[in-house]
Amino acid sequence: DPRPLVVDRLTKHYPVRRGLFNSEVAKVHAVDGVSFELGHAETLGLVGESGCGKSTVGRCILRLVEPTDGTIALGGTDITHLDRHAMRPHRQRLQAIFQDPYSSLNQRMKAGDIVAEPLVNFGQRPTRDYIGDLLEKVGLRREQMDHYPHEFSGGQRQRLVIAKALALEPSVIVCDEAVSALDVSVQAQVINLLTELQERHRIAYLFIAHDLAVVEHISHRIAVMYLGQIVELAEKRDLFEEPLHPYTRALLEAVPIPDPEVERDKTIISGDVPSPVSPPSGCRFHTRCPHAFDRCRSEPPAYREVKAGHFAACHLND
Ligand code: SF4
Ligand code: MG
């Protein structure tokens, strides 16, 4: 039984001009050799500061962005370079939930039609009963299928987005800041719902967020990204109890961010994130790492399995 999702050395570089009067083209190293797997009914949390490349990873998997290198396998099928048409039969198995439910919902459509849309796109004609069941599954009432998005609260709108994502019975859902715009209490409800749906329908989640506290509850394993690379990946408990990378330790010590709407782009660790156009030599974290030593400035640390199932890229683990 192939894994729902296998990402191997995924890389995305964007060309950028060095400046208005400079024709030299530089590369943004948005994602640089990211590898991970998702097991059946597993959640992998993918965390890191704004601009670390985590959303680009999600967008490559969803085929919204063309990777520069590496492969993406969905249930054993290589989908890395499939175009829209070739991707169609696989689309059903792969769904997405984004941050802002208001902008991702068509305001002129009734809730029932919104949820039915993916099915209709696949040539199915869902009954009102089926749509009502989907709404109930996500904690909404059947009658709400005749309501418009503006009649829903923020949390209810995100439930609607989840119902729409569930309609095609996917095996993988990429959730990018899926609860970040919601109040903390509503966040917890939506996360509980996602967990319950995962158990019932055996869905794997790639759960992308800038805040470790948000991914903690839902994740089985967590990957931490810094400047386009995964610097640590482990079972949740191992990552929280025995972080092996100074960046992860810094994230764990950082105060939780109470209002993601306001704080989203704020750096949570002292020092600015260096530009992904010219990432620092050696270990990319060396400009902010409190433990950096000579070797860190010249030699990139290998990303390796330090303990069973616990990967990290830091010279201190040698
Ligand atoms: Fe810090 Fe060096 Fe480890 Fe990088 S390799 S995280 S700079 S100690
Ligand atoms: Mg993002």
Image (cartoon, grey):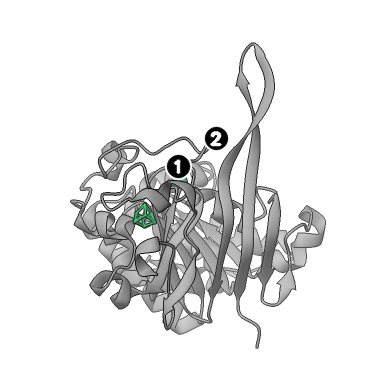
**Discs 2, 1 touching: Cβ within 8 Å:** no
Residue at numbered disc 2: 277
Q: CA distance from mark 2 to mark 1?
A: 12 Å
Q: Name the side, left or right, on which 128 lies relative to 315.
A: right
For this rendering, which residue is in front, 135 or 250? 250
Nearer to us in this view, 209 or 314: 314
Residue 51, disc: 1
Secondary structure, mark 1, is loop
Left or right: 318 in relation to 33: left
Residue at image point 66% right, 68% down: 92
Height in image: 1 above or below 263?
A: below
Q: Quadrant of residue 123?
A: bottom right
Counting from the top left corner in percent of width and height, residue 91 is at 68, 64
Query: Could you tell me residue 129's position as x and y percent?
Result: 54, 73
In terms of depth relative to the viewer, which is nearer, 81 or 164?
A: 81
The x, y position of residue 39, in whole percent, is 53, 80
- 310 horizontally vs 247: left or right: right
The residue most toward the front is 294
Q: Quick check: is the Cβ at mark 1 less than 8 Å away from ligand 2?
A: yes
**Residue ID at (76%, 61%):** 87
Q: Residue 133 in the image: x percent, y percent?
A: 48, 74
Mark 1 Cα-neighbour bin, 10 Å: few <14, some 14–19, many ≥20: some
Residue 226 vs 78, above or below: the answer is above
User: Which mark's residue is nearer the viewer, 2 or 1?
Assistant: 2
